[in-house]
Image (spheres, grey):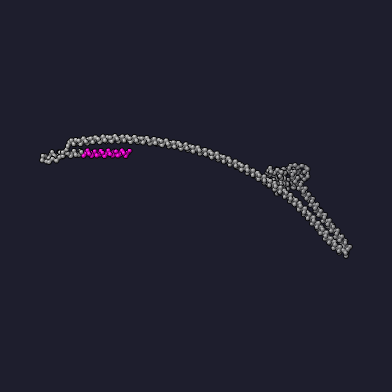
Amino acid sequence: MKDKNDKLGLGILVSVLLHIVLIGGFFLASKATQFLAVEGGNGGEEDILDAVMVDTSQVSQEKQRIAEQQRLEEEHLKKEQLEKERLEKERQQAIELEKEQQLAAEQKRLEEQRKREQEKQIAEQKHLEEQRKREEEKQIAEQKRLEEQRKREQEKQIAEQKRLEEQRKREEEKQIAEQKRLEEQRKREEKKRIAEQKRIAEQKRLEEQRKREEEKRIAEQKRLKEEQHKREVQERKKALAEKKRKQAEARKRKAEAEQKRREQQAREAEEKRKAEQQAKKKALEDFLSGNHSSGSAGKHGAGRGSAQGDRYGSRIKRLIQSRYRTNPNFVSKQCNVKIYIEPNGLISNYTVLSGSSDVCEAAVRAIRSVHKLPKPPASIYQQYRSPILDFGLRVQ
């Protein structure tokens, strides 16, 4: 529309310029005619009049035509102006309409944008709600997984405890079997030792018997030899042989008597040693258990020393008992330990005689932790210098 208006304005401008040029031409022609008429009147009769004849009616018609043309041009210009104003008004209306359409389009675009943003916001809220639900589901799943993991760990812990309990039972059974094996081995060794002692004694007896028989054989050979020499001096030889025979019999009787005496001494010494050991053990059991009587004290020749032994025994019993750590598994088990006490109360050594290994380990730990006992009274030291203690659930 703008290009069309520009072309219309350019056409009007060209038309106005052409009309101005035409009017100017007519005006100049009119001025030139008047100038020539003046010059001819002033030259005299003699001058030649050079003039152009002009038809006034034609000029008038021309003027009317020009005036009409000017009027028409003015009307045309007025019409063009009105047309231009109308076109400008239409253009303005078009611009206003276009602005209204643009405004309506912008409002529609904004409304659509608002709707899109609202839909986007709704979609975002929906997305966040779904994300929240997924997070809640994930959290619930995680809690469920942790609960299942805790249950599995708890079951694993229970299984591990059960396995450890079974292992402990197997080790305890193994320990009991080992103790039983050691006890049987000790019995076999004891039987073997006794059999070895019998074998040595029998071998010694046979050796002595062989010696006696050898002596007897030698004596017989000698006797036969002497009898051979007796043929010449029978009486002398006979007397000498009789003397030697008596001497041999005397030596034999003496040797047999000496052997019997030694065997009797060995038996008496062994019986005495066993009796002393039994008496010491009984005395130790009495003073550790606190059940001494005047009879037992008199039996050991203690008297006042027995009362001191009771007090001393109670002290060392409490001391060792305080360091002795028992276990419910010690029921029906025991361990015998012999300790060696110096005159200053120091435990110089100890010997595990027999018993369960676990009880013996606890007993040894208690003895090592004590290390030194109260100094024993001199009157009872010999009686309790190497007592045998029985360890079980308590120290006996």
Q: Is residue 236 left or right of residue 343?
A: right
Q: Is residue 322 magenta?
A: no
Q: Which stretch did the figure color magenta?
A: 1-25
Image coordinates of residue 225 in percent, x first then y, are 85, 63
Whether 317 is drawn above or below 78: the answer is: below
Q: Quadrant of the C terminus?
A: top right
Task: Report the residue at 50% width, 38% height from top.
Answer: 130
Where is residue 11? Give x, y as percent: 28, 39
Residue at image location 20% in from the left, 35% down from the top: 61
Using the image as rendered, state which of residue 258 and residue 373 is in the foreground.
Answer: 258
Look at 16% across and 38% down and name the residue there.
53
Q: Residue 316's quadrant in the figure?
A: top right
Q: Is residue 378 visible?
A: no
Q: Nearer the viewer, residue 110 or 201?
A: 110
Image coordinates for residue 263, horizontal then vertical, percent: 80, 53
Q: Is residue 45 left or right of residue 303?
A: left
340 lies left or right of 8: right
Q: Nearer the viewer, residue 321 or 10?
A: 10
Residue shown at the point (31%, 35%) measured from the top left: 87
Q: Nearer the viewer, residue 145 or 160?
A: 145
Q: Quadrant of the N terminus?
A: top left
Give x and y (percent) for residue 366: 68, 45
Q: Residue furthest left?
A: 46
